[in-house]
Image (cartoon, rainbow, N blue to C red):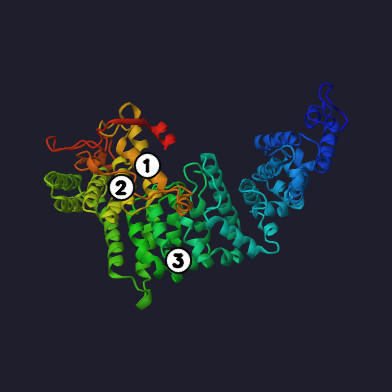
Amino acid sequence: MDKVSPDCPYPGCFFCVMKEGNPSKRRASILKFFRELPSQDDDGQVLPISGLWNTAMAHPNDPEFIELGIFECMSSLICKGLKNRRWLSHDQNIYIPYYAAHIIGSYTMNMEEFAESAVHAGVIAPLVELLRGRLTWVEQRVAVRALGALGYISQYLSCSSKSRRLSYHCDLLTRGMGGVEMESRKAEEWASQLQCWSLQLINCFAFKPEFLPAICKPEFLTKLPGMWGGLVNENSPAGIGLLRTICHHKLGRGPVASCPGLIEALCNIARSSDDWQYMAIDCLLWLLQDPSTCHKVIDKAVPALVDLAEITTLGDHKKLGDSIVNVLQECIQSQGTGRNSINNRTKEQIEELLSSRQRLKWEKNMPKEDLHIKQAAALVVKLEGNSLFSSGNISGAASKYSEALALCPMRSKKERVVLHSNRAQCHLLLQQPLAAISDATRALCLHNPLNRHAKSLWRRAQAFDMLGLAKESLLDAILFINECSQSNDPDLSLRQNKVPDYAERLVKKQMRAAWLFREAAIKHGGVHCDGDAGDIYGQDTDGSEWETASESDIGNDGRDEMGDEDDDSEWKNEDERKDKYDKPPMKGTIQCLNAL
């Protein structure tokens, strides 16, 4: 290179080249640098590579380096590291393959033309070698990130040995990385990213029907619901995202419907506060709409979908509840006989849902005075249920809440939220976690905003915990803490921004249970499953925190379904009530979650 700063001791220094004022000379020098770098053995090569990495991260859409041959240079450097271990161990060259793969991934993540240039430059073969573990898992992580960015040009990835490559990749996900000793939180975060990016890469293949047989292996599919990005990769749909892509195609729905436990796992995600809840709902709806899979999944899918039928909008999904009702109605109308028939309990649940929709239509034509009478009657029955609960008659209280729900107008959403939430607590105390999840989910779907009713979140978190569903329980518990931090309700608001000890205990317990390396740690003796979370319930049980909504949600000429009053205003027996939320203050919300 021609230009070197007078103060720089290194001839051809990349950083000096970048300061060249003449654009044509600068481009010629950069081109020469990229061509010559892989053949050089000088010390300090990692410095310009790290500079290129920073540039790629900051300006991934800048075409200059792509035009001048950065992909060919990075590909050659990775190959050099794979073939020449002596060079790799010299100076700080051990970092060069990592940076090189990272640079390829950054430049190909947004721009299709950059991805095509990378493929033509020959980056696929060295990246796949890194993916196979030729160096370390750290390089695996950035290699799968780069390959995932290239994945949408799948014809380039579908070269020879495609089935073997997919099988290897699926194995990488499911073996749990038990042989890798990673104790730091940063290592766990990176390994979680490796898993998420691996899923993203497989997802690219899953859009092509010819790859589905290689992907849809039962032992792999059944593990997908448990693969999630954790709290550090919240933008990755992970396993549920791949399942949604698989279920979108008819060839994928058959294997999914035939996997034991997979439909139940999809139902749990659909009824959770997972950010990707809608993906699980999509999977269930597509499976029900397919005549070849409907009869296999309907008995498990219907209870979950009935609970979710009150959802209005979820993300980009408008009128999702209506879509659910329409699909279930089609199931009833198209039911067959014998093997393809619907069992009586499932049929009853669908018919009850359809009846409630019909009831809503009837109520729109009822006089407002009649609606007020029905709502007042429901309030009286609910207060009877509160009294029975306070006296210890939990089953009687649950029956009263059911009776109140039958009376309460369908448009009185506030009051119905309260009734479902109270009945959920009865089910908890009666050791009926499935019923508690059902009622808490209905309350959360009715609530505005969706999935933000604090007490229902806490009750469902406990119910999920009873069933050993750590991830679902964890997400609900964290949302509960978040809602408490924003609540004006004196029973829910966090005193001095402190997290209640019972919530902190549950979050800690579920973070241990949902830990990415839990199975590997148990295998190697690193985790003790002795109920170390303590008594999650004990005196903290939400025993008699009974709520009531506004006496009238029908005001405003029936235009306002939700009313303006807080849905947690309550009618309570002050002599009997135990204030569950009045606990000694613990760590602040953010500090607590960071420390867990």
Work out whether 339 lies above or below 487. Answer: below
Residue indicated by mark 2? 462
Q: 273 left or right of 88?
A: left
Identity of the amino acid at label 2?
Gln
Q: Is residue 380 left or right of residue 540?
A: left
- Closer to us: 79 or 484: 79
**CA–CA distance in space, label 3 to label 1:** 30 Å
Above-or-below relation of 568 to 322: above
Under mark 1, the amino acid is: Val
Whether residue 49 can be seen here: yes
Q: Residue 259 — which label?
A: 3
Label 3 residue SS: loop
Which three-letter amino acid code belongs to the residue tagged 3?
A: Cys
Where in the figure is residue 46, as x and y percent of width and height? 73, 36
Q: Which is more toward the observer, 516 or 423?
A: 516
Placement of the N terminus among the 4 image quadrants: top right
Q: Residue at x 39, y 49 (%)?
A: 528
Residue underneath mark 1: 507
| Inter-mark Cα distance, 3 to 2 | 27 Å
Q: Give SS at disc 2.
A: helix
| 151 relative to 125 in the view: left or right | left
